[in-house]
Amino acid sequence: MSKPTVAIHKFSSCDGCQLAFINMGEPLLVLSELVDILHFAEAGPVDENALVDIAIIEGSVSTSKDIERLKRIRNNSQYLLTMGACATSGGLQALRNMADTKQWITDIYANPSVIDSLDKSTPIKDHVKVDLEIWGCPVSTRQVLTAVRALLFGVMPKDENEKICMECKRMQRVCVMVTKKEPCMGPVTRTGCGALCPSVGRDCYGCYGPAENPNTQAMANRLTGLGLLKDEVARRFLFINSGAEAFHVQGIRTRDTT
Ligand code: SF4
Ligand code: SF4
């Protein structure tokens, strides 16, 4: 019996999520026993147009050729997952969505005409149907593997969208906001990283994007109460996941409030 097939595609990104995938060690060997990885340019196999059961996408849509390639990938796959902040919210490169991209290109590059860049960096879901978004910068390989394993058994993976604070409590971590007055974004950020930053005594900066029902205004008020200036509060939201609606709206609202 043939094995299920997987392809891992890259769009605009730093490759960090693919590297996290490669670095997972032994579980990757187990995965390679269970599936045939037909396209994963970072690791070796290249067959961009392969028909697969599961396509996993890293990176955002940023160039004029991306949309056509993305539609081809969607047509060639049964399930399509996004991996990481770039693919799910547009990533750090979506910061340019709030600026004049053409002006930046003119200012930075000696020969701007060779730069093929759309005005905005957008998440994959803006262009094709996405079956599951896996957040994080970089992504949690545990979450990717859990999702792939569920799909191999014909089960739609659970979207882990509760708040980091819940994970901290379960792991019995001491709250860095309460005890150290750190401007922690855990109350509005989705879980999945294993409460990595609070576990080493520092604040979460929201790299997993908005959790379910985030009370972003209360979060902004609390950050102000901790002494952050208005622009500093806005930048807590307008950072890695500035393209995620809940963070974007709150960041702009805070920034533009007089
Ligand atoms: S989500 Fe972060 S780690 Fe992953 S590709 Fe984008 S910038 Fe790199
Ligand atoms: S604690 Fe926050 S900033 Fe740190 S890895 Fe987790 S989501 Fe990212």
Image (cartoon, rainbow, N blue to C red):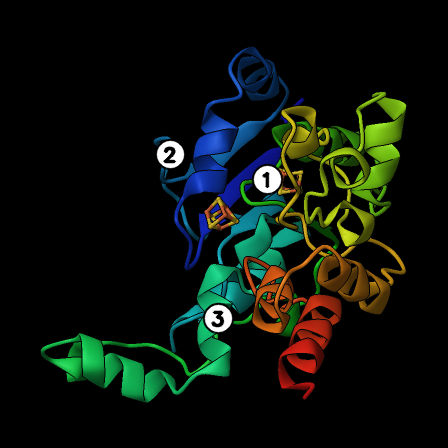
Q: Residue at x 20, y 75 (%)?
A: 108
**Mark 3 CB lies closer than 8 A to ligand 1:** no
Residue at horizontal 34 percent and vertical 31 percent from the top:
44
Is 50 on the left-hand or right-hand side of 173? Answer: left
Indicate the secondary structure of the residue bearing disc 2: loop
**How far, Cα to Cα, is label 1 from label 3?**
19 Å
Mark 1 surroundings: few (<14), some (14-19) or many (≥20) residues within 10 A: many
12 in relation to 106, above or below: above
**Residue matched to label 2:** 45
Q: Secondary structure at mark 1?
A: loop
Q: Amino acid at mark 3?
A: Leu
Label 2: few (<14), some or many (≥20) within 10 Å?
Answer: few
Is 187 in front, or is 118? 187
State the residue at coordinates (55%, 45%).
Answer: 137
Q: Is mark 2 within 8 Å of ligand 1?
A: no
Q: Secondary structure at mark 3?
A: helix
Tell me the quarter of the picture where residue 257 sits: bottom right
Counting residues from the start of the chain, the first of labels 3 and 2 encountered is 2
Determine the image quadrant of residue 106.
bottom left
Quarter of the N terminus within the rendering:
top right
| Marked residue nearer the N-terminal end (1 or 3) | 3
The image position of residue 208, as x and y in percent, is 67, 48
Q: Which residue is mark 1?
A: 139
Q: Nearer the viewer, residue 124 or 251?
A: 251
Q: Is residue 110 left or right of residue 139?
A: left
Count residues near mark 3 (Cα–Cα under 10 Å), then give few for <14, some for 14-19, many for 20+. Answer: some
The residue labelled by disc 3 is 95
Residue 232 drawn at (x, y percent): 58, 65
Seen as rendered, the residue at the extreme left is 110
- Answer yes or no: disc 1 within 8 Å of ligand 1: yes
